[in-house]
Image (cartoon, rainbow, N blue to C red):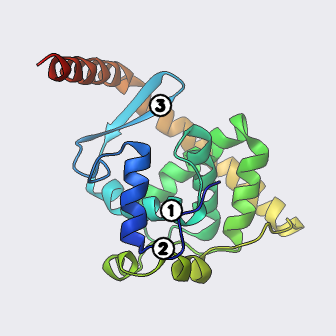
Amino acid sequence: MTAHHDSMTMLEARTKYFADNGFGDDGGYGDAWVDFKLGPVPFPFPNSPQRLHAVRFHDLHHVLTGYATDTIGEFEIAAWEIAAGCKGFVAAWLLNLGGIAGGLVSAPRRTYAAFVRGRRSRTLYGEPLEALLHAKVGDVRRRYIEAGVPTAGLADAMLFALTAIVGFTVALALFAIFVPLVPVGLLMSWLRARSLKRAENA
């Protein structure tokens, strides 16, 4: 995991995070569709207002926790957010529960470690966003994020097992919804690559 410098504001750190990950100046917030890939296969889904509202906090969680934006990193932060609490953000609950299922299949130890860390942290969901963006990263991290590597207990294991059951149920439902959208994702990827190639040749 990498951590952004504590002396940065959250806005400065988020700008760096967007640049480091190639998300564009607005982090993709203005995109109509979101591309999530399992390996080379894209699973696009609409960038709904509910998802957009949640992702503004989700991106700040990446800044604070240091979890990467690759597939495994997204599974880790999904487990962390579920354990730390998504409050009334339904889109976050659904997508993160599906992410826990993916994490159990591909990186169970890392997913469980992130869940245990989340149990001792708090998410930013529902906090005043503008105030957060102008706060220092170090101050926010100390207030919300578990700093060390916590030791898992029996309660952690039991809650994780229950969450995993719910996660696999949600993942199957989401999979059934998004699989028909794979051709759309492939077409969008082809059109985007074609557009970029035209721009380079112009």
Is label 3 in a helix, a strand or a loop? Answer: strand
Q: Are marks 3 and 2 in contact (CB under 8 Å)?
A: no
Instruction: State left or right for residue 91 relative to residue 168.
Output: left
Which quadrant of the figure has residue 77? bottom right
65 lies above or below 202:
below
Above or below, 72 relative to 135:
above
The one nearer the camera, 103 or 197, is 197
- Amino acid at dot 3: Lys
Q: Please tell me the numbered disc located at residue 124.
A: 2
The first of marks 1 and 2 along the sequence is: 1
| CA separation in Å, label 1 and label 2 | 12 Å
Neighbourhood count class around disc 3 (C-alpha, 10 Å): few under 14, some 14–19, many 20 upward: some
Camera-side mark, 1 or 2: 1
Q: Which mark is residue 63?
A: 1
x and y, in percent, of residue 85 in the image: 57, 69
Give the residue displayed 56% in from the left and 47% down from the top.
74
Q: Residues within 10 Å of mark 1 (few under 14, many from 20)?
A: many
Number of numbered discs: 3
Q: Secondary structure at mark 2?
A: loop
Residue 137 in picture, x, y percent from top left: 50, 75
Q: Position of residue 14 (x, y in %)?
A: 40, 62
Disc on the earlier residue, 3 or 1: 3
Q: Secondary structure at mark 1?
A: helix
Residue identifier under label 3: 37
Please say whether residue 54 is visible from this viewpoint: no
Counting residues from the N terminus, which is met first, the one under dot 3 or under dot 2?
Answer: 3
* Residue type (three-letter) at the residue carrying disc 1: Val
In the image, 42 versus 143, the foreground residue is: 143
Q: Residue at horizontal 49%, vertical 49%?
A: 95
Q: Residue furthest left?
A: 202
Placement of the N terminus among the 4 image quadrants: bottom right
Distance Cα–Cα, label 3 vs label 1: 21 Å
